[in-house]
Image (cartoon, grey):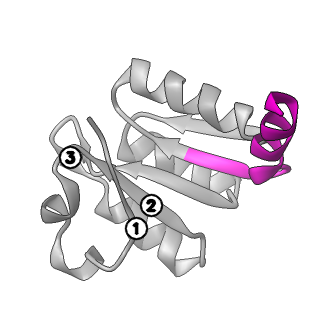
Amino acid sequence: MMEAQQQSLQSTLAGVTILVVEDEAIVSLLLEDMLFDMGSTEVLLASDVESAFGILAARRPDIAVLDVNLAGVFAYPIAERLAAVSVPFVFATGYGRFGIESPWVARPVIQKP
């Protein structure tokens, strides 16, 4: 039973490249491990807006996870860039849906502890 669950989990993101924009190194690495466990073939890590733009200039991820507040700088410019090229993304924030600015409130939000 556990093996079937593990295989199902690994096929969830099979072959998917994911951009993770997170300024907390430990959270970033934990997300990376979880996404690889779920079958992602590549996880692109950025800790700020500039490094995310650098990645996006060279690569097009399949999906992205954006921490809303990157050491006091909001990730909305990254969200705009992703939306412009139709890359689906979710926001991750400790503030919940109330921490998302109005143009983005309809986007999926993952509540961080």
The answer to whether residue 79 is above or below residue 61 is below
Are dots 1 and 2 in contact, CB under 8 Å? Answer: yes
Q: Mark 1 points at which residue?
A: 108
Q: Earlier in the sequence, mark 1 or mark 3?
A: 3
Residue 90 - label: 2
Tell me which amino acid carries mark 2.
Val
| Rendered-image quadrant of the N terminus | top right
Q: Which of marks 1 and 3 is in front?
A: 1
Tell me which amino acid carries mark 3.
Val
| Residue 57 horizontal/vertical position (percent) | 61, 56
Distance Cα–Cα, label 1 vs label 3: 20 Å
The answer to whether residue 24 is above or below residue 35 is above
Residue 73 - label: 3
For the magenta stretch, what is the residue range? 1-19
Q: Which of marks 3 and 2 is nearer the N terminus?
A: 3
For label 1, the crowd category at 10 Å Cα-Cα, with few meaning under 14, some 14 to 19 and many 20 or more, is some
| Residue 48 horizontal/vertical position (percent) | 37, 39
Looking at the rendered structure, the secondary structure element under dot 1 is: loop
Distance Cα–Cα, label 3 vs label 2: 17 Å
Tell me which amino acid carries mark 1.
Pro
| Rendered-image quadrant of the C terminus | top left
Q: Which residue is drawn at 32% across and 80% down?
A: 106
Q: Which residue is drawn at 49% across and 47% down?
A: 52
Evaluate whether residue 41 shows in this view. no
Distance Cα–Cα, label 1 vs label 2: 5 Å
Looking at the rendered structure, the secondary structure element under dot 2 is: strand
Image side of residue 94 versus residue 7, left or right: left
| Residue 34 horizontal/vertical position (percent) | 61, 32
Q: Which of marks 3 and 2 is in front?
A: 2
Image side of residue 24 versus residue 51, left or right: left
For label 2, the crowd category at 10 Å Cα-Cα, with few meaning under 14, some 14 to 19 and many 20 or more, is some
Looking at the rendered structure, the secondary structure element under dot 3 is: strand
